[in-house]
Amino acid sequence: MSRRSKLAAVTAALTGVWLLLHGSMGLGAVVLGASLSLIAALITRRLNLPQGRLRRPLVAVELAFVVLSDIVRSNLAVASIILGIRSKERTSRFLRIPLDMQAPYGLAALACIITATPGTIWVAYDSVRNSVLLHILDLVDEQVWLDTIKGRYERRLREIFE
């Protein structure tokens, strides 16, 4: 893809997001959104970001469904904790998870997934040990979390980005 077509694609995507967030397709919203999107695309082009490539788009779609189901399940679990439905004590702790993935966009996607899932927060990334520190609201079994992060998310992200 040429630089010009990348610029056009980024501008179009940002304009689309602007219009969705703005909630209007009026001429003023389109002109302002397109102008700001073009400026943002030109600025980010100069940042010299690392190249990334979506290698397996079908795996990305599969991952989106996995993440969506996990977010719904986590919302229900957190709601039951907040509403006092679950009577057992919860154990809120930090957990360090070693990662095999090194792709910057894969790590960024993993951070977004973890942060978007209620009850979990991406606290820190250690690039020396290639591990992530998470805070988990209700940590019952560490192995379940290791299997979830590595098996459900990291494995798919590696297929997509590495």
Image (spheres, grey):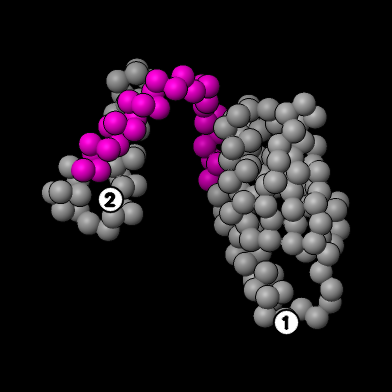
User: Image quarter for residue 102?
Assistant: top right
Residue at figure coordinates x 62%, y 43% from the top left: 111
**Magenta span main SS:** helix
Q: Quadrant of the C terminus?
A: top right
Q: Quadrant of the N terminus?
A: top left
For marks 2 and 1 on the same chain, the one whose residue lies earlier in the sequence: 2
Residue situated furthest left in the rendering: 27
Which numbered circle lies on residue 85?
1
Q: Position of residue 161 (x, y in %)?
A: 59, 30
Q: Nearer the viewer, residue 12 or 152?
A: 12
Q: Position of residue 23 (x, y in %)?
A: 27, 58
Residue 47 shown left or right of residue 88 in the figure: left
Segment tinted magenta in the rendering: 32-61
Residue 147 painted magenta: no
Q: Nearer the viewer, residue 51 or 93?
A: 93
Q: Residues within 10 Å of mark 2 (few under 14, many from 20)?
A: some
- Amino acid type, mark 2: Leu
The relative height of residue 74 versus residue 95 in the rendered view (above or below) is below
**Residue hosting label 2:** 19
Residue 123 shown left or right of residue 140 in the figure: left
